[in-house]
Amino acid sequence: MKQIRKLAIAASLAAALTGGLTVPQAFAQAKEQFFPILVYRTGAYAPNGVPWANGFIDYLKLTNAKGGINGIKLAFEECETGYATDRGVECYERLKGKHGGATAVQPLSTGITFALTEKAPGDKIPVITAGYGRSESQNGAVFGWNFPLIGTYWMGADVLVQHIAKKEGGFDKLKGKKIALVYHDSPYGKEPIALLQERAKMHGFDVQLLPVAHPGVEQKATWLQIRQNKPDYVFLWGWGVMNSTSIKEAQATGYPREKMYGVWWSGAEPDVKDVGEGAKGYNALAMQHGAEPNAKVIKDVLGMVHGKGQGTGPKEEVGQVLYMRGLISAMLQVEGVRKAQERYGKGKHITGEQMRWGLENLNLDQKTLDALGFAGVMRPVQTSCLDHMGSAWARVHTWDGKKWSFSSDWYQGDEKVLRPMVMLASGKYADEKKIKPRTPEDCKK
Amino acid sequence: MLYRENGQFKTSYQADQQIFPIAQDRLGVLLLIAFAFVGVPFLVDEYMFRAILIPFLILSLASLGVNLLVGYCGQITLGAGAFMAVGAYAGYNFLIRVPDMPVLGAILLGGVSAAAVGIVFGVPSLRVRGLYLAVATLAAQFFWDWAFLRIKWFTNDSSSGSVSVANLDVFGVEISSPLSKYLFCLTVLVVLSLAAKNLVRATIGRQWMAIRDMDVAAAVIGIRPMYAKLTAFAVSSFYVGVAGALWGFVHLGSWEPAAFSVDRSFQLLFMVIIGGLGSIMGSFFGAAFIVILPIFLNQILPVFGAIFGVEISTATVSHFEIMIFGSLIVFFLIVEPHGLARLWSTGKEKLRLWPFPH
Amino acid sequence: MSGRKIGDVILDLNNISLSFGGVKALQNISFNVMEHEVRAIIGPNGAGKSSMLNVINGVYHPQEGEIIFRGEHRRDMDTHQAAEQGIARTFQNIALFKGMSVLDNIMTGRNLRMKSNLFMQALWIGPARREELEHRQKVEEIIDFLEIQHIRKTPVGRLPYGLQKRVDLARALAMEPEVLLLDEPMAGMNVEEKQDMCRFILDVNDQFGTTIVLIEHDMGVVMDISDRVVVLDYGKKIGDGVPDEVRANPEVISAYLGASH
Amino acid sequence: MSFFIETLLGGLMTGMLYSLVALGFVLIYKASGVFNFAQGAMVLFAALAMARFAEWIPGWLGIESLFLANLIAIVITVGIMFVVAWLVERLALRHLVNQNEATLLMATLGITYVLDGVGQTLFGSDIYKIDVGMPKDPVIMFEALFQGGVLINKEDFIAAAIAAILVAALTLFFQKTPTGRALRAVADDHQAALSVGIPLDRIWVIVWCVAGITALVAGIIWGSKLGVQFSLSTVALRALPVVILGGLTSVPGAIIGGLIIGVGEKISEVYLGPYVGGGIEIWFAYMLALVFLLFRPQGLFGEKIIDRV
């Protein structure tokens, strides 16, 4: 008996060491475009990771249902990162060579983004970080392969400051106000600090920094401090379970939810739905889109994907905020491919390097967006070699106890504030890494 | 029949004190190292290098360090992740702040800094032991997690708190391709493993083991518990720190404190316990098991599913991955509490006697 | 007993008292040990014999009293100091290093004499390597002396009890001590093993001139091999003298009769 | 002053939850010498089961009453925790008798993974709510005494009462029932317990089950306040300093240690945190416990260890 056991161990070990690691690699196929998808459907951040992934995949399915990109079908494969950097790197390495090579990669984690930023230039694979990642990577001259499309944290924080300034009746009214930033204690949560401090200097308000340790289930002390200091506004830079915990603690300490503003990663259904009425009045940035159950693209998804029984997640969640985020992220990548095909040949397979050109020359005007079914969902996006963000527009939406609805006009991140910060930080990065920034001439190549 | 030590007589103590007293072992290990240096580069692809082998080598080094402390000196630590972080961040600071700092120097100095920090956090071991000590080392873990997030000096005032290094070169050779990274890590690992083996067969190693097995008796024969424990903390932290620096510099390139979280500490302790406490070889087995098994499960489960015609969702795969991983850990602890290294040596002993079992 | 000559007092214990919480383990005990002699401590279970040895080599620190070792007056000993000044010790419940081989166990006994630093050991060069060989030679002599050549490489955990006791002695001898404390070296042995052990103890005493302090239950053995005997009962000294004196001491007789029946 | 009282109350409230988790640690350690790292996973598992069954039962059985649904969910969850205890004993513990502490610790970490996986597979990874009808909005009290009054959550007091009832019930169980006395006998001396014929395997199942019930209570309190999600299992890490402060073998130690750590955490974060950038509460709790250990290595109420050679 003991012998057999030992034998079994030896066998399983041998199998582990030699076998499965060389899982058959699919051969390159010319007629498909491969989208690796790094997701987290388990663990601390699953509530937010899941809808994003569902939206992303549904859009790829929709694209295929519509005939692909000029006839090229999309191939895709998920890999679970669990929000852990090393697993993320493993996933990236695993997927990047499959199906003729990854088109681009979207890590949905600031930590993984940092790690891939180092690897992408070598592999010539663009890293799309729609609404996250490092803010200075907007500068495409230095960060040649990073695309923080349609939103960086600096831009988001800037819009929030603009919004409260408007509420107060002008930037001059911000003087002496107190803003508390409750943030996830990680590079992600720390991103907005630089901008808030810059703005604080300009307008004379106070920023109080309140870090919350991963995963953010213990915030008693944070909210006691808020109760003590009575800030005029609370900005929330959380993710996963931290968001709903913050709102619940705000309720428990009696802080008005109307004075709370979340970033776009802290303003979706999973963050508020189990708080229900308690979250009423809570605001969050909308990264252009909010919950969009009535958008045409959602009707398409419901009809052509879910209607055929091929939907990825639960049907009720289609069109929710994070679902839309995933969907738009996928759309931007698809449109990148389409743009690249315009230059490198319609109906052709696009390499990572060609994809970069496509992403750097995105030009989604309102007409195109309307045609894609995004009317009313988002504004035009136009990127360039030097601007990898492409759009600095955002608005605010508010939870009314049952659903998210917009509660502000559009704002645009202030170039005068953002640009110098981006240039300074990316310049420092370039120095450290000894990167020679690309010139506009380089971009034409 | 081939694996025998019959006829190999030692005529000097020197010959008897070799690392591998049996000729076949010696040859085997040399062949293995030669294969790792020369053969592997021709056989594996980039994915194997970057996603499996390099992490495996680096975590082997870390697990070796943890094993020196836990396996040889008997001091349980749950703070190894913090010492990796200290190694990585200290190495980073040496690299960017000291002009013309060579990369290798920065990595080693990262290890030295980790050793210094290790000594400080080893002090409680003089008073408390066992699980109390394990929990006490978590203080180091959480303190450094916090320090690297909060103290801007450590991250060179980077606004996000994450740091990165680039343009690694060692003695004029650029360390950027997967192969060069692999060879670099392999060299460091081989050299440091050899040093570790030397330490554990020398007087310091015996002192550590004496403290581990029976600390009062050790004190009675003149071993100073303070010296033995603190050197164990220092040497162990040095190894772990170097591993941390390699993890940051070579594997990730850019990192944040979360790369060295408490999960990493647990992972390292798993490695030495599954691999075998008090065994250099065991550290490698453990690292292989812990690094490779989850990835293996993650890739093989969908394949299994496909065989039976079911499509398993990513979430289910992950859930099964951790369930199977957890069960296998319990299973291994039950069938061989002394770790994979013990299985290995039992196997060898059988082989020595084969085909005559008695 | 040919070659040895009993010398002056090497260790003198004055009015030693030791207690744990409320329990008084030793009360006001005084006795001395002379150079080169075999000194026995006897007494029923719980008399405080082991505690006495623990006080001598610094594992326990008495609350009161004074220890004079080689003319130096001390309030208490410290284990490291004791070892450095040549006090070695074996244990009642064998305190060998279970995870190590016999050879390594004995080698630890040499640790105080090994001076090479960590780096040399890590690189296995120069002094470290030389030292290792030198001390190995010395250890092999002890192995030969105690006739345990055949188990050199065996992990001590796998050895039978009698042999473990012998390895315990070997480790103490490897320190080349001046004073050797033996805590029930023959407990649990059969007659043959006891005879061997007695022979070893007397040889050590004889050949190396080592002073021996031993605790033993077997009265026959004690009376045979020791020069002087001290008797403890419930933490108090009730007798001290040459074997014949002690044997005749009525207090000792009653303590033993009372304890064993 | 009123703010200090609020901080103190907040700390006590958090501390109470730590105490409940630590209580689980101590019960299992006393009875089996296993440092059960899976206690956090058990809290999560129990809370998830409870939350999900309370959600499903109205649909399954057509019950309208929230109270009834919760009650049935609690009963089912207790049953599940019993099965978990039984399986743990059957499949893992009984094969690991006499292993060293580190091995046992790792085994419970293995169990943690299994529980995390099973829990998420069966019950999902979303954020779920436990609605046991606790009042959510705070009230201001003692306005006459302090300027501005003291902000108080009734929920906290109800939770504290539940915890107190649990502790009282456990005390009764240990003091008055034959099983409880047997458990104490095992804790005091394994050999002795065996020699008077107490079946160790049954004791282990019972003690794991009791730990499972304390986990459920902790889970309900926490879940009702902040929701149930995977991250809840990290509460084990927050409760660890408690057991080293209180002593691994002491029930009063776990309770008082929990309160000390809870209060220490909140006061340090609120009053010291702002000077060093905040976020210090985790390591501060550990440092507090550590410094304490240096003076009293066996913890607040642990037994002193004397080396015998």
Image (cartoon, coloured by chain):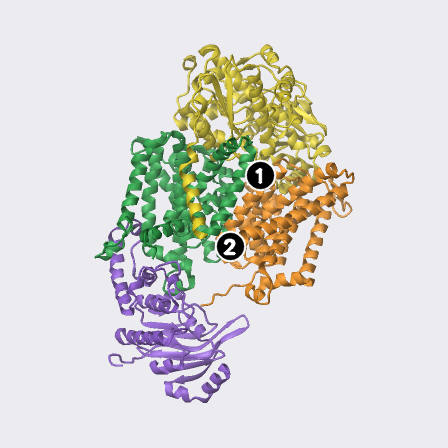
Chain colours: A yellow, B green, C purple, D orange
**Vertically, is B97 above or below C94?**
above
Q: Is residue B75 left or right of residue D197?
A: left
Query: Mark on residue B191?
Result: none
User: What secondary structure is found at the residue carrying circle 2?
Assistant: loop
Visible residue check, residue B326: yes
Residue found farthest to the left: B11
SS class of the residue under badge 1?
loop
What mark, if any, has residue A215 been given in the picture?
1
The chain letter for the residue carrying disc 1 is A
**Residue A5 drawn at (x, y percent):** 45, 49
Kindly identify the amino acid type of the residue bearing the numbered disc 1: Pro
Q: Position of residue A273 (x, y in %)?
A: 68, 32
Q: Are marks 1 and 2 on the same chain?
A: no
* B42 to D303, vertically: above or below: above
Of the pair A161 and A69, the residue shown nearer to us: A69
**Is B90 displayed left or right of C211 in the figure?**
right
Residue type at the position of mark 2: Leu
Seen at 32% across and 74% down, the residue is C196
Callout 2: 10 Å neighbours few (<14), some, many (20+)? some
Residue A366 image-quadrant placement = top right
Residue A188 horizontal/vertical position (percent): 54, 32
Number of numbered discs present? Answer: 2
In this rendering, the answer to whether C196 lies above or below A168 is: below
The residue that appears at 41% across and 74% down in the rendered structure is C187
Mark number, residue D96: 2
**Tag 2, which chain?**
D
| C-alpha separation, residue under disc 1 versus residue under disc 2 | 33 Å
Q: Tell me if I can see residue B86 in this picture.
A: no
